[in-house]
Image (tube, grey):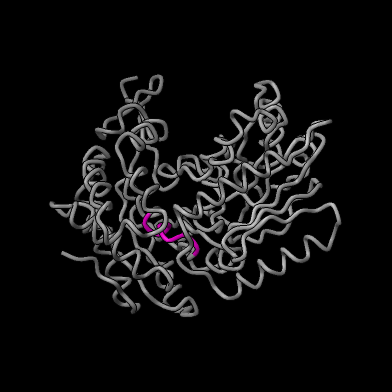
Amino acid sequence: MSIPVFDSAEQISAAAENMRQTVLALPLTPDAILDVFEKWSANLGSPDTADIPGVAFLRMWLRRGTLEPIITRELGQEALHNSWTPDGRARLKAWPLGVIGHWAAGNVEILPVLSMTCSLLGGNACLLRLPSALVDQTLRLVEKMIQSDEAGILTERVAMCAFDHERQDLQDVMARAVDGAMIWGGAEAILKIRALPFHPRARLAVFGPRISAAAMDADTWCNSQERKSWCQRIARDVWQFDQQACSSPQVLFLERKEGHSPSGFLQDLKDAFEVENRVHPRQEIQAGMTSTICQVRASWSLDDNENMAIFPLGPDWTILFGRGSAIPVPTQGKTLTILEVDDLLEPISRFDGSVQTLGLAINDTEKEDKLTLAAAVRGVDRIVKLGRMHVFAAPWDGVDLIRSMMRMVRHVRSSE
């Protein structure tokens, strides 16, 4: 059994309708889906897929222990077995929308599959448009799902499209064919996809372009005993997805402490970056990114005599240290800007809704509560411990990942 890859209007329309009939005729319980996901997670550890960036996180996401609490929270206590959940005198039960279209960005290798799993968990069928750069990786990941799906309960609910993003005719056909859509990408791509001729009842979940930041208070970075482990967590967050994911920290705001130099912290962070680079070396880098990194290093040092730039001879990683409370234009490519501030509330109060995730290392609980409240008010959707900025969990961008592509049916008995 294999997953078809379509590139014509007739094939796309027919595949969507066939899958829609499958959803109507063969309802699935989340419990049965999780059985397949568990096997899929194990199979992804084989050598032919283990080298795909992000697979370690995908494997963890697919585990029952990760997903059961999310399903219960989003769909109700009885949802695992497809039963009704009591709600006062009424009862609630989730039903799939039907066929969900997935338009994934091409900057994160596992994103098409990750998006697909969200709607499969709700019993939907999935029509994926594969970014040209991710066709090979996605096919390898999905092949492991097929191997894990002995009864074919998920395989028959997945179809993939491979066509150039400029093929407006095929984009239109795909939009007309689906009952809902999960859309990921940059501003231009998002606007184009949202303008497609979706059915008026189609449900859209949009995950647009955002960036992420981190903050560390003075008590944390001044504690030499714990500082090394925090630096390891920062390096881990920076290295994942080469800083291209929305959850990647681009800047770390460091609370200044009178009479204490950040030199010890910067040395520990440099050491952590060097270790991470040895364990997870970059496999390749585009010439344009190398040029951008070199330009940023030079301009940072020239802009202010007090600025510091720490980096190896090559473009593997870069630490830029200075002062300020505004988020700089992201460089990516494992380039972390560290800005010293007198009060961590100062940069957070300037967030404008573009910050998705805020990674924190705060020693004082009361201070962290204040920072969390301020960040939430300013549009941040995920506030987590440093080292966990990429842990994929619902809600994401403030949206439930499974429930967003489902209908919640409410039933009040006529005898009530």
Q: Please tell me whether residue 298 belongs to the stretch shown in magenta.
A: no
Query: In this orientation, which residue lies closer to the viewer: 29 or 136?
Result: 136
> Which residue is located at x 58 percent, y 46 percent?
271
Quadrant in the picture for the C terminus: top left
Q: Is residue 410 visible?
A: no
Query: In this orientation, which residue lies closer to the viewer: 157 or 175?
Result: 157
Q: Residue 301 appears at what percent x and percent y?
A: 79, 60
Query: In this orientation, which residue lies closer to the viewer: 412 or 93?
Result: 93
Report the side of 32 relative to 141 (left or right): left
Report the side of 124 relative to 182 (left or right): left
Q: Please tell me whether residue 109 belongs to the stretch shown in magenta.
A: yes
Q: Is residue 225 above or below residue 193?
A: above
Magenta region: which residues?
107-113
Q: Is residue 43 above or below residue 348?
A: below
Q: Is residue 76 above or below residue 112?
A: above
> Which residue is located at x 61 percent, y 68 percent?
188
Report the side of 257 relative to 354 (left or right): right
Q: Residue 47 appears at what percent x and percent y?
A: 26, 58
Instruction: Give the quadrant of residue 404.
Output: top left
Instruction: Give the quadrant of residue 137.
Output: bottom left
Instruction: Give the quadrant of residue 259.
Output: top right
Quadrant in the picture for the N terminus: bottom left
